[in-house]
Amino acid sequence: MSGNSQEHGIRYSIAVDTERGVLLFTGRDAWALQHLIRAGENGVTPLERPAPRWSHYVWKLRGAGLDVETITEPHGGTYAGTHARYVLRTPCRIRPGARKDGEHGAAA
């Protein structure tokens, strides 16, 4: 069994208002953007919100015109090194009704 969300009947979609207009995101891109918006200035790290390809989701959000800053942070432990903290710099507002499919409310 793979981790494909569609196999589990869950599909994410989110519409956001930006200075460039309304942008629509789906799947893991929508999931990542929602976490970035909620985190605000604190940003998100893959250590706090594990997901298999954070760097790819951020790359795709940037490709859509969003400004996402990458801050490199050190961490200790057995596997000491660095990790990324992603901070959304583009002002975004989730449009009313944006939701995870399968939940109540209007679709984005």
Image: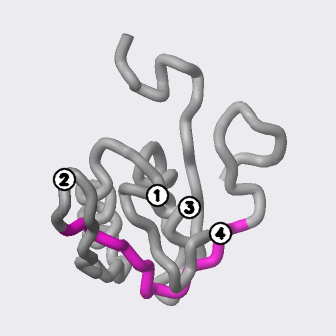
Where's residue 106, x and y in %?
78, 48
Q: Are marks 3 and 4 in contact (CB under 8 Å)?
A: yes
Labels 2 and 4: the sequence-earlier one: 2
Could you classify mark 1 by the number of other residues whose Cα lies within 10 Å: few (under 14), some (14-19), or many (20 or more)? few
Q: Amino acid at mark 1?
A: Glu
Q: Residue furthest top?
A: 1
**Between discs 2 and 3, the one toward the N terminus:** 3
In the rendered image, residue 83 lying in the magenta stretch gets the answer yes
- In the image, what residue occupies the spot 48% across and 28% down? 5
Earlier-in-chain disc, 3 versus 1: 3
Q: Give percent across and percent down for residue 87.
A: 41, 79
Judging from the image, the colouring scheme is one colour
Q: CA distance from mark 2 to mark 4?
A: 37 Å
Q: Residue at x 48, y 63 (%)?
A: 33
Label 3 is placed on what type of residue?
A: Gln
Q: Is residue 15 rendered to the left or right of residue 53? A: right
Q: Which residue is mark 2?
A: 79
